[in-house]
Amino acid sequence: MKSVSTTDYYERLGVKRDATADEIQKAFRQLARKFHPDVNKAAGAEDKFKSLNEAHEVLKDAEKRRLYDQYGENWKAISEGRQAPPGQGGQNFDFGGFGGAGGQPDMGSIFEQFFAQQQGAAAGGRRRPRSRAAKGEDMEAEITLDVIDAYKGMSREIGLEDSEGAQHRLTVKIPAAVRDGQKIRLKGRGHPGVMGGPQGDLLLVVRLAATGDFRLEGENLHTMLLVSPWEAALGATVDVNTLDGALRLKVPAGSSSGRQIRLRGKGYPKADGEKGDLFATVQVRIPESLTDEERKLFEELQSVSKFDPRATTE
């Protein structure tokens, strides 16, 4: 690969003049990682990095690259409506596109191109509109939160990679009650601007994931309510977790696993500020081991009970 000190932008990045945008980007990232001042402390590394960045800023932009291919180092003067330096005329020609005999350029074609450019510039005395500064494109990325963190709001540190391939850490403030699919805009964290324009924004798309306590469906929350066999059979008042802390909940007698108890207004906030509902699903939990007394009582219950859980019910 040739030295990055060359004045030719293509040679700085070590790519051919017909390189694709992806090839240019790939070559730049490889060299940028090598010469980035945060990584390479050698003398001259920073200057090389700036040189690479200068070439990349031009060749990654289709309009700037077209002007550079046509006018060479005078591309910027042309884009700003200024005249090229005296004696240079601002006219560059790529002879590779005119295949004459024996590999020599077809001079007729070259002169046709020259006069076509001159006539276009002189027609009506009009000058080609100069390029204007434009804001860079926005970027999108996803950020996954559990339901509790999303409800309460929090700060989350994320990693970003800039256009030079350098890694950055950024702390993002997540607003309380953010909803699934909602976008958080981070100004100035998107793609670089065009012709000195402002940088685009980064849009973080929020995705809410199920946690050990809660599963979200729309604005309704679902949670498991663990009860003992005697609580399920006799009824009981137990604690159930909500987004705002534990609440006392009455479990009706004769509750089997799978029964849902609805708590209105204890779900996730809607866009209008109202809340959905919380559904607590009963799950009967059996002791894994029994004491002698517990076993004796269960055996007594077995001997007197007529309940058949496998019997068909209407």
Image: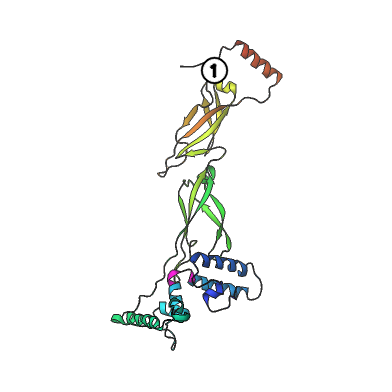
* Whole-percent x, y for residue 268 in the image: 47, 40
Residue lying at 51% horizontally and 38% vertically, measured from the top left: 215
Residue 80: x and y in percent read 41, 78
Q: Residue at coordinates 50% horizontally, 73% vertically from top-left?
A: 17
In the image, residue 64 lies at what x, y percent? 44, 72
Q: Left or right: 290 with respect to 230?
A: right
The residue sitting at 50% across, 35% down in the picture is 222
Based on the displayed image, in which of its 4 quarters is residue 2 positioned? bottom right
Q: Is residue 254 above or below residue 49?
A: above
Q: Is residue 35 left or right of residue 142?
A: right
Viewer-proximal residue among 3 and 76: 3
Say above or below: 121 vs 310: below
Magenta stretch encompasses residue 104: no
Residue 149's place in the image compared with 66, above or below, is: above
Quadrant for residue 224, please give it. Answer: top right
Label 1: how many Cα within 10 Å (few below 14, some 14–19, many 20+): few
Q: Is residue 73 shown to the viewer in this render? A: no
Is residue 108 among what the camera can see? yes
Question: What SS does tag 1 mark?
Answer: loop
- Residue placed farthest to the top in the image? 304
Residue interval drawn in magenta: 59-64
Q: Tell me which amino acid carries mark 1.
A: Arg
Q: Quadrant of the C terminus?
A: top left
- Circle 1 sits on which residue? 310
Residue in front for this viewpoint, 148 or 299? 299
- Residue sitting farthest toward the bottom: 87
